[in-house]
Image: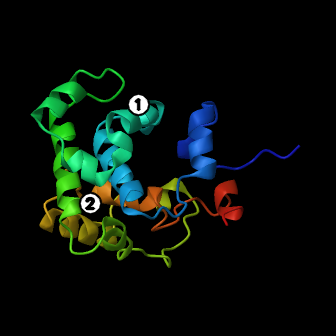
Amino acid sequence: MTELIRCTWAGMSDPMYLAYHDEEWGRPVRGDDAVFERVALEAFQSGLSWLTILRKRENFRAAFDGFSIPKVAAYTEQDVERLLGDAGIVRNRAKIEAAISNARAAQDLPVGLSELVWRHADPDSPVPRTMADVPAVTPGSKALAKELKRHGFRFVGPTTAYALMQAIGLVNDHLADCVARVTRP
């Protein structure tokens, strides 16, 4: 029996992490609320393991009204306090307030959030052979971070922007021989 080859960051033991790697990471995500969810979760992940965020993702979705931009944009200080008391999510005031602020910024964009983010797609990025070939920041992620910040977004530096780009398929950083690259639709 042939063992499947995966990107080394996916590990091999946690079924949730493996499913995320195999079925979700690097696959195109479109739609303003769907992209907003990823922006928010990438910001919450800052300084933490992505597996921590994956394990709490359903709690985040419930706590943040499915990441509906209009609903989150309408949050008040009472909602901030409610979220700070929710043990099912990452309880960091700055990140919670950034998510709310980012929903308001997304609501005010002249184009949708999905369209703005996808303008920075780089489908011709080189295929990485090893994890050393995968950058943490690119000119595209710097441009995306700058554009988001220009519109009032917070917690969206170039590294976070690149993680977002990878997660939602703007770039495909699955390694050359990774099963998720080979089987990608």
- For image coordinates 63% across by 49% down, the residue present is 22
State the CA–CA distance, disc 2 to disc 1: 27 Å
Local crowd at mark 2 within 10 Å, few (<14), some, or many (≥20)? many
Q: Is residue 22 left or right of residue 50?
A: right
The outermost residue toward the right is 1
Q: Is residue 153 left or right of residue 59?
A: left
Q: Secondary structure at mark 1?
A: helix
Name the disc covering residue 174, or none: none
Residue type pointed to by label 1: Asn
Q: Position of residue 170 (x, y in %)?
A: 45, 68
| 178 up-or-down from 51: above or below | below
Q: Secondary structure at mark 2?
A: helix
Q: Position of residue 38 (x, y in %)?
A: 38, 51
- For image coordinates 51% across by 73% down, the residue present is 126
Residue type pointed to by label 2: Pro
Between 47 and 41, the one lying in front of the other is 41
Q: Is residue 2 left or right of residue 169?
A: right
Residue 7 visible to an observer of this rendering:
no
Q: Quadrant of the C terminus?
A: bottom right
- Tell me which corner region of the image, top left, top right, bottom left or bottom right, holds residue 3: top right
- For image coordinates 89% across by 43% down, the residue present is 1
Name the disc covering residue 59, or none: 1
Local crowd at mark 1 within 10 Å, few (<14), some, or many (≥20)? some
- Tell me which corner region of the image, top left, top right, bottom left or bottom right, holds residue 47: top left
| 29 up-or-down from 49: above or below | below
Residue 70 visible to an observer of this rendering:
yes
Chain-order first, disc 2 or disc 1: 1
- Tell me which corner region of the image, top left, top right, bottom left or bottom right, holds residue 17: top right
| 103 up-or-down from 184: above or below | above
Name the disc covering residue 158, or none: 2
